[in-house]
Image (cartoon, rainbow, N blue to C red):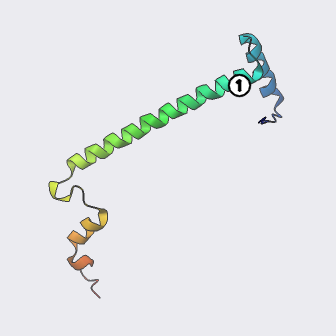
Amino acid sequence: MATQLNLKDPILIERARALARRDGQPVTAKLRALVDREWEAQEADIARRREALKQLIREIREGMPEDVRGMTSKELLDSIYDEGEPDGFAR
């Protein structure tokens, strides 16, 4: 299945052609390599951020008191208030 990308930026087109000529590659192959390199860089950045977030979550959990670890936010709030209603808000 052929797919097209219609580029209308003359500077982009000329630079893509020049880069391809320098490397002796077809323009499509050069553009693919450049896009793949950017894709991989972004994927690596996402993976680093995800791991940093997981580490932060681990540190927060480790710093929590034992009796609230593993509780949902609703369970935690319900444990603070009588019968799930804050003081002064009883029906």
Three-letter amino acid code of the residue under disc 1: Leu
For mark 1, give the secondary structure.
helix
Where residue 42 appears, as percent x and y from the top left, is 54, 33
Residue 86 seen in the figure: no
Instruction: Give residue 75's quadrant in the image.
Output: bottom left
Question: Residue placed farthest to the front in the image?
Answer: 1
- How many numbered discs sit on the rendered protein? 1
Question: Residue, x 75% and y 24% (percent of image)?
Answer: 28
Residue 81 placement: quadrant: bottom left
In the displayed structure, 70 sits above or below 5; it is below
Please state the horizontal and vertical placement of residue 89, each as a whole percent of the image. Answer: 29, 83
- Residue 45, how many percent across, how many down? 48, 33
Please tell me whether residue 78 is drawn above or below residue 62 in the rendered image: below
Name the residue located 25 percent from the left edge and 60 percent from the top edge.
Answer: 71
- The residue where tag 1 is placed is 31
- Give above or below for 91 relative to 25: below
Q: Quick one: quadrant of the C terminus?
A: bottom left
Residue at point 81% right, 22% down?
Answer: 14
- Residue at (31, 46) in percent of width and height: 57
Residue 15 is situated, as x and y percent measured from the top left of the image, at 77, 21
- Residue 9 in which image quadrant: top right
Mark 1 is surrounded, within 10 Å at the Cα level, by few (under 14), some (14 to 19) or many (20 or more) other residues, namely: some
Q: Quadrant of the N terminus?
A: top right
Q: Is residue 44 left or right of residue 28?
A: left
